[in-house]
Amino acid sequence: MFFAPLLLAAALMPTAPTPPPALTTPFERDPQHNTTATYTECLAFYKDLAAAYPTTMQLRAAGLTDSGQPLHEVVLSADGTFEPAASRAKGRPILFIQNGIHPGEPEGIDASMALARDLLRDKQLLPLLRQVTVVVIPAYNIGGMLNRNSTTRVNQNGPREYGFRGNARNFDLNRDFVKQDSRNARSFAALFQKWRPEVFVDTHTSNGADYQYTITLIPTQPDKLGPVLGKYLQTQLLPALYAGMAKKSWPLTPYVDFAGETPESGLRAFLESTRYSTGYAALFNSLGFMPETHMLKAFGPRVRATYDLLLTYVQTIANQAPTLLAARAAADRALATQTQFPLAWALNEQPSGTVEFRGYEAGHKASGVSGQPRLYYDRSRPYVRPVPFYNAAHAVASAAAPVAYAIPAAWGEVLDNLRRNGVVLRKLPQPLTGPAEAYTIEDYKTSPKPYEGHYLHSQIKLATRTQKSETLPPGTYLAVLAEQGAAARYLIEALEPQATDSFFAWGFFDSILQQKEHYSDYVFEDLAAAYLTQNPDVRQQLDAAKKTDPALAASGPAQLEWVYQHSPYAEPGYRRYPVLRWMSAVPR
């Protein structure tokens, strides 16, 4: 059994013969347990495993990555049930494990290799694969995994060599799940939509404070999941995971993120937006988890803790399968009738409870670099004490669902992303007339520096214009909400501009933010004066605006621009969001 000589917790697991050398991992073969598999070693291991267990495992290519290498999926099933429909027909939840999104955080890569082997080989573990179908991405960021070094994770205690955070195009793939700039993300989306797992686990290593725990856990924020699925997560799945890890001698705690200088200020739940893997999974009512091992612990214990957590997931899901499936089905039914959708979130100001936290006392001493006071943690002074836990969130922006979204055919990249994520699109064969709502982008802020290949927009302010009779031309695509099923939340959070990770926020519609026509002021002066004379109500609006805006009142050019923007001469498409909210029934 994996790590049996090394870990007391392993005594709780079934024993099995030592595997042949071809089915041991580089981590296991290293006496110091400070080695992580290379990409070549990892793929070769799974190929050997698939050859050894052809009736219970399949290894399949699943689309390209930016490295030029294919993404792979590993499917484990005790009776050869290797497709999602067959698995669901047998009442089996699907556990989807993703590794190596940040290849400098490789514990999941090595742990999953050993776990896959043990689930297939051990007669006491194999029955679990009759109750749960396990899908594994052995290495997601292949380009980063191929870019090995020993220095970029400067805070981390091993392994000797590891991969790099950025992928082959230097994207952080854990910021790419909605915008899907990378081929990695596009292949992942197709794979995720194929399986639509009940539980999704994305393995990581943390930075930050020092504390006693080897592993911490970020679950999907429960308020984002709706009442039934959120309650199941809080009252059944998480307690079982915590109890299962405690039995294996790995106490768990929520991810250590805090607002003050040290954890005693209170742990804060990570509000993962949809750019992150677990935020993306939540859009489809998948329970997402991001285990984070602690960077300062040795690599050996970090891999062992990850192995035990992944095994605990399999065991817990097997035990709770009917309840999990029922909660997921209830969430899907609720989504089908949902009319109001949250678009942005904030943590509540008051804590929702406390956590018995195992930390180290902190203090300050003179820096050896600057001589100024610096923070340090004293491992000779451990403590266990309650700290506040901020784990409740509320929506700070929301939108009512329209009947449909109307997307012009010109926006091909947007349409491709929607299709890839399960959105059903209808192409109009003839004109369609009816009421609609149109947005104008009144204001927004843009990051002064690029972020993941984009200049991200935020603080978006919209003006909504109701149009009683809008005609859509043939070739327009309609995404009818009633036809979307599980993709409804993705559709809304992608196309509502004020959503945290909307396509507008990521710059997909930036061309509407630039005027293409304007005026010569000496020519337009006469036209503007005549327009104000002919339209006294506009003159009154200008006078009122000058009274409330001293800068406008003091500037002739600004007043001329104001008149232009309030006249028929203004460019009609400028800042007009091209996606319409269609408000009437759509004929078949």
Image: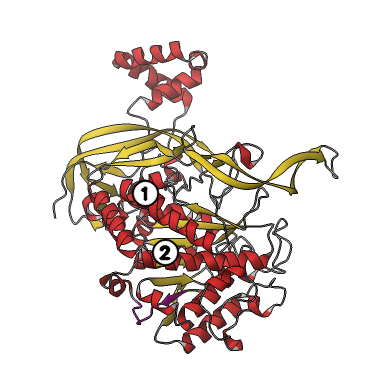
2 or 1: mark nearer the eye? 2
Q: Amino acid at mark 2?
A: Thr
Q: Residue at point 48% right, 13% down?
A: 553
Q: Residue at x 41, y 37 (%)?
A: 394
How are the residues colored?
secondary structure
User: How far is disc 2 from disc 1 in space, using C-alphas?
Assistant: 17 Å
Which of these two is toward me, 104 or 65? 104
Image location of residue 319, percent across then percent down: 37, 65
Answer whether residue 81 is magenta in the image. yes
Mark number, residue 413: none
Mark 2 lies on a secondary structure that is helix
On whether residue 401 falls in the magenta region, the answer is no
> Is there any visible trace of residue 173 in the rendered image?
yes
Residue 432 at what x, y percent from top left?
17, 47
User: Which stretch appears magenta?
Assistant: 73-82
Q: Quadrant of the N terminus?
A: bottom right
Q: Is residue 373 above or below residue 67?
A: above
- Residues 42 and 362: in front is 362
Taking the image as shown, residue 533 lies to the left or right of residue 336, namely right
List x then y, in percent, for residue 32. Answer: 72, 73
Residue 208 position (above or below residue 397): below
Residue 284 pos. (x, y %):
35, 56
Going 47% across and 65% down the picture, which residue do you hit?
312
Lateral position of residue 193 relative to residue 271, left or right: left
Mark 2 in CB contact with mark 1 (< 8 angstroms): no
Residue 180 visible, this orientation: no
Q: Which mark is residue 316?
A: 2
Check disc 1 and give the amino acid type. Answer: Gly
In which quadrant is the C terminus drawn?
bottom left
Q: Which residue is mark 1?
A: 230
Overall secondary structure of the magenta section: loop
